[in-house]
Image (tube, helix red, strand yellow):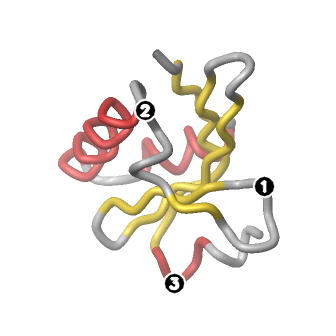
Amino acid sequence: MYEVKFSQSAEKDFYKLEKDLQKRIVASLERICIRPYPHVKKLVGNPYFRLRVGKYRLILDIKDSQLIILVLELGARKNIYNFI
């Protein structure tokens, strides 16, 4: 089972969100802990993946050797792809 970790900026953005949206994001991350690949999509031209939660996107780095899912960035769909 994979362990989920947040980068500092992603954690800061996470706590700025509304409580119900935080719960949806946590539920989505718990769902992908066992087998992440069926739930995420690979970003073109990057080693990262994205997870869709409503209008929000999470940019993830999946480290199979360490069984870690690192949440690099999260935000609204219109703004998140500027990160890349």
Residue linked to disc 2: 35
Looking at the rendered structure, the secondary structure element under dot 1 is loop
Question: What residue is shown with label 3?
Answer: 78
Name above or below for residue 82 compared with residue 20.
Answer: below
Residue at x 50%, y 64% (from the top left corner): 75
Q: Which residue is mark 1?
A: 47
**Residue type, mark 3 in image:** Lys
Kindly give the residue lying farthest to the left in the view shown. 20
Quick one: quadrant of the C terminus? bottom right
In this rendering, is residue 1 above or below 17?
A: above
Camera-side mark, 3 or 1: 1
Q: Looking at the image, which residue is at 64% across and 35% down?
A: 70
Mark 3 neighbour density, 10 Å: few (under 14) some (14–19) many (20 or more): few
- Residue 27, above or below 56: above
- Give percent across and percent down for residue 78: 51, 84
Alpha-carbon span between mark 3 and mark 1: 21 Å
Depth check, front residue: 17 or 71 = 71
Q: Position of residue 65 (x, y in %)?
A: 74, 20
